[in-house]
Amino acid sequence: MSHTPPLLMTKLAMPAAQPWLVSRSRLLAQLAEARSRLTLLCAPAGFGKSALLSDWFHTSYQGSQASGITWLILDEADNDPLRFWTYLGTALQRLAPHVGTTLLQGLQTPHPPLEALLTTLLNELLTVREQVTLVLEDYHVIHAPSIHQTLSFLLEHLPPQMHLVIATRSDPPLPLARLRVRGELCELRAEELRFTLQEASTFFHQTIGLALSPEEIALLTERTEGWIAGLQLAALALQNQEDIHRFVEAFGGSHTFVVDYLVEEVLSQQSPSIQEFLLHTSILIRLNGSLVNAILEREDGKTLLEQVRQANLFLMPLDQERRWYRYHQLFADVLRVRLEDTHPDLVPILHQRTIAWYKQHGLVDEAIGYALAGKLFEEAADLIEQRIQTMGSYREMAAVWHWVKALPDQVAHRRPRLCMMAAWSLLLSGQDERIPPYLEAVLAAVEASTQAPFKREMLGHMTALQAVQARYRGDSPGAIALSLRALEYLADGYLFTRSVLYMNLGSVYLLSGEIEEAGHTFGQALQVAHVNNNHPLVLTIRCNQAKLLAAQGQLRQATATYQQVLEASTESRGRGLPEEASAYLGLGEIRREWNALTPALEALTRGLELANLIGEIGPLSTGSMTLARVKYAQGETDQAFDVLQQAEQRVPIPLYTAQLVACRARLWIAQGEVARAAAWGQTCGLTPEDQPSYQREWEYLTLVRLRLVQHRADETISLLRRLLSLAEKGKRTGSMVEILLLQALAHQAIGQAPQALFQLTQALQLAEAHGYTRLFLDEGPSLAGLLHQAAARQIAPGYVRTLLAQFPDTMAPSSVQERTGLPLLREPLSPREREVLRLVAAGLSNQETAAHLTITAGAVKKHLSNIYRKLSVRSRTQALARARELDLL
């Protein structure tokens, strides 16, 4: 089973009160009055950013009782996008339990598309009614471009009640200029943050209790340029000076000089035990008593922590209970440099002790971070392999790559299991081109090994990965052969990998139209998954079994199976995102076929939202095609084409891209845009003389429809016969019904009415028991005419009447229809709709029309949708032609 690593909750802790600070009312007022999207505190180390935020928090939010603010302190390890957004999502859940839930679920999937995840997160934030603030502290440690990109997306779309505060040492690569121009950025920089003379005076007299003259304070403030850390260090050094004035007179130099000088002065005044404490604990990002005891091998760590805190030695509490602390970053940096200079041999020992403490407390991820920071690469590799063993799911392997790439190649490549998991990580994150060196390392280890079980294990895992690769690129024969070979290697044990292989095989068989073989293989996968007690995988297999039922025409049984999957996923509290996505999309397709368009739209919308989180190409492609067809059936033609275009941009696999393009051609045919569809027909690479395959059945049936509207029906007869034979062999009822309907239309087009009626009858007999509807409606008036003939002959009379009742009511003859060949208006256009139509006829875009009428572009789209429905058309071109025929323009 998958394992989510524990989080360090001190990273999310609100800052503890620090009553010794100078209250900075002028800056607090600016923070309080900020109504911008982003407040940025940007200044070098030591300018009081954290102290100011702490004071602001305790002044404005009343400490831990605050419900409208959440906090995240960042560190270097957060450059892993998965870790960054996991922590941020957990922080946001403190605002409301449901906020961030889908984000955290989605991050458990392979290579999650963060923009889609954040869209869902933003929708959840919209439901929070109160004003909320998210504080990101120490953002300067983040240098991963993908994090900057996704945070920019979040920032650009923040709901109005949401406020982001960032504290950083350098300007983050966020859209600051754009926010500044819009007046959506409040900035506090070094110039504003530095101590004024009055604040420095308060600091020395009241906070520190030093009796400095105004001239001495002014000189120190001038020399430090109001740099707060410098003044703090100066105050510490001054406490032990006999001649204060002389010290102040001599004080000067750059920040680096000042830090080096004052730290030396401060350290030299401390007891040996405190000096040792400061240096030895400087490698720690966070400190508590137990961890200090472990790293120093003593028992009074908590007492020493308190002594250091009371001495104001740049130790900052991280929680209200004062259990966890961290050093001022600048102070820690200087201490670490000094440690490296004075005790270089001690550094790896201190890291090893830290690693041991984190391992003992089950925080393996943090232990890995310290091993890498301490350049203990063999130790790090051991820990990464240990972490892999607890994952239990390839979907979590993407996290491995963040660690593996930090290892020297000579370390990683000596560990075949680590290389194997790195290869899986790269596959799941879409980085196939980086896989070969790792597989070569695995293969070299296999060739060098004399252990037969090890050789079989590694070859099995390597072949399994290659099998999934083959399926991803549409190589069905290769995927089948490799999957079977991998199963031979892994015949004993390795239950998870074997279940994945059976799933891979079943998916390939399903794509190839080998329904019975797919059903048998999914059954094997289900059996192994049950033995492995892998609940998510069981639900995934059940979804695939439902797909088989749907392909065989068992639409009601498929619906029941999908519903069971959703119920089981709900019981597992949302941990089954992939299964939920497949179930919703499957339900959407069946509901569309039953002509329940609104319920279909709801299911498809939810399914695609989840599929976007997962990033799986197949569901995204097929779900988008179904959604486009629903939109088209509802008269939302422009939206239908938009759906296809967006999906095509997301789908890199040629097999799925070709289906999306064919779907667009099919909509063009339905619109009467024959020239556009014909252009597709010339470039698709298909001909009626081909021996078709199930994988490209959608494209071939689109080609048939193109030939029918091109009055070349005779060219389709033989192709349809071959397609029907394939469908019958696979017992794919839905395909059989569709092909029979096209055969009926083709024979009708060439004047073979009896044959056309015979094939329609066969289609009706197959379809009636399962409630097929859209297969008939989508063929339009030509098929409606055939259905009227069937009704006259009492062929499936009840079913035919039900079908005819659902065709658009546009067939009754009228004088206008006889003159124009087009149906009458069923409902008059409103005045605003006439305005929109007039502007569209003038060539204005949706945006230009919206600006002219002082409405939104969305409102224009809505008006156009109503116009299309009332005119019984599906595009702008058709709407304008129809309007001119009816003298509406």
Image (cartoon, rainbow, N blue to C red):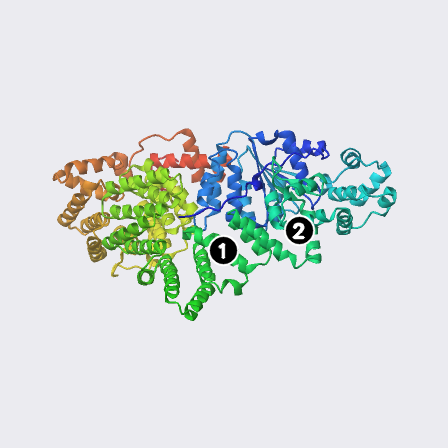
Question: Which residue type does callout 1 highlight?
Answer: Ile
For the C terminus, the image quarter is top left
Give the percent coordinates (x, y) of residue 413: 49, 64
**Relative to 700, does residue 30 appear above or below in the rendering?**
above
Give the percent coordinates (x, y) of residue 86: 50, 44
Question: Which residue type does callout 2 highlight?
Answer: His
Q: Is residue 419 visible?
A: yes
| Mark 1 vs mark 2, CA separation in Å | 26 Å
| Residue located 50% across and 55% down the image | 383
- Give neighbour class at mark 2: few <14, some 14-19, many 20+ (Cα, 10 Å): many
Residue at the limit of the structure toward the left, as seen here = 793
Give the percent coordinates (x, y) of residue 872: 32, 37
Judging by the rendered image, the residue that carries numbered circle 1 is 384
Question: Which label's residue is closer to the chain start, 1 or 2?
Answer: 2
Residue at the limit of the structure toward the front, as seen here = 299
| Residue located 45% across and 51% down the image | 111
Label 1 or label 2, whichever lies nearer to me, is: 2
- Helix, strand or loop status at disc 1: helix
In this view, the residue in front, 869 or 693, is: 693
- Helix, strand or loop status at disc 2: helix
- Residue 602 bears which disc, if any? none
In this view, the residue in front, 411 or 352, is: 352
Judging by the rendered image, the residue that carries numbered circle 2 is 280
Q: Is residue 638 visible?
A: no
- Give neighbour class at mark 1: few <14, some 14-19, many 20+ (Cα, 10 Å): some
Give the percent coordinates (x, y) of residue 491: 31, 60
